[in-house]
Amino acid sequence: FIMIALWVVLSVSGVATQLYREREKPPFPPAPYTLWKRDRERRKTNVLDPSYHLPPLRERVLLRLAQFREFFRGEQPTGERTPLLL
């Protein structure tokens, strides 16, 4: 009975000492995945983030025009006339 009581007192005093010494330290940082999820959610709802807003009308029109031109552009020859492996 004395040994069990000694182990209980030792473990309780160890936990109390650790909590007393760690009380002023900052908490352990969260996992990187948790930080990434939180930042991703914040970016979704952040109104001040530039990626949240639509680009200006001029840039949108120029982008659509470039996509339209790319659609009708023919294939560029690569310079190869015969296959490399026969």
Image (spheres, grey):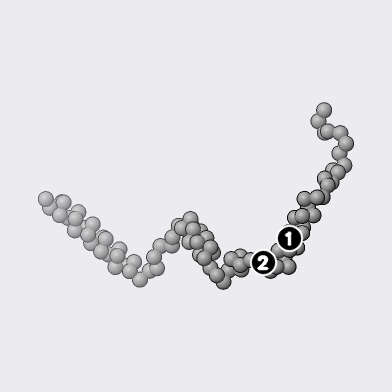
- Residue 80 seen anywhere in this rendered image of the structure: yes
The residue at 26%/60% (across/down) is 14
According to the picture, the residue beneath numbered tag 1 turns out to be: 63
* Image location of residue 66, percent across then percent down: 77, 58
Q: In this rendering, does residue 39 appear at all?
A: no
Q: Residues within 10 Å of mark 1 (few under 14, many from 20)?
A: few
* Residue located 72% across and 66% down the image: 59
Q: In the picture, which quadrant includes the C terminus?
A: top right
Contact between labelled residues 2 and 1, with CB atoms less than 8 Å apart: yes
Looking at the rendered structure, the kind of residue marked 2 is Pro
Query: Left of 79 or right of it: where is 7?
Result: left
Q: Secondary structure at mark 2?
A: loop
Q: Earlier in the sequence, mark 1 or mark 2?
A: 2
Asked if residue 6 is positioned above or below residue 49 in the image, the reply reads above
Indicate the position of residue 50 as horizontal and vertical percent values: 61, 68
Amino acid at dot 1: Leu
Estimate how packed mark 2 is, as few (under 14), some (14 to 19) or many (20 or more) residues with alpha carbons within 10 Å. few
Q: Which residue is mark 2?
A: 55
Q: How many marks?
A: 2
Q: Position of residue 17 (x, y in %)?
A: 27, 64
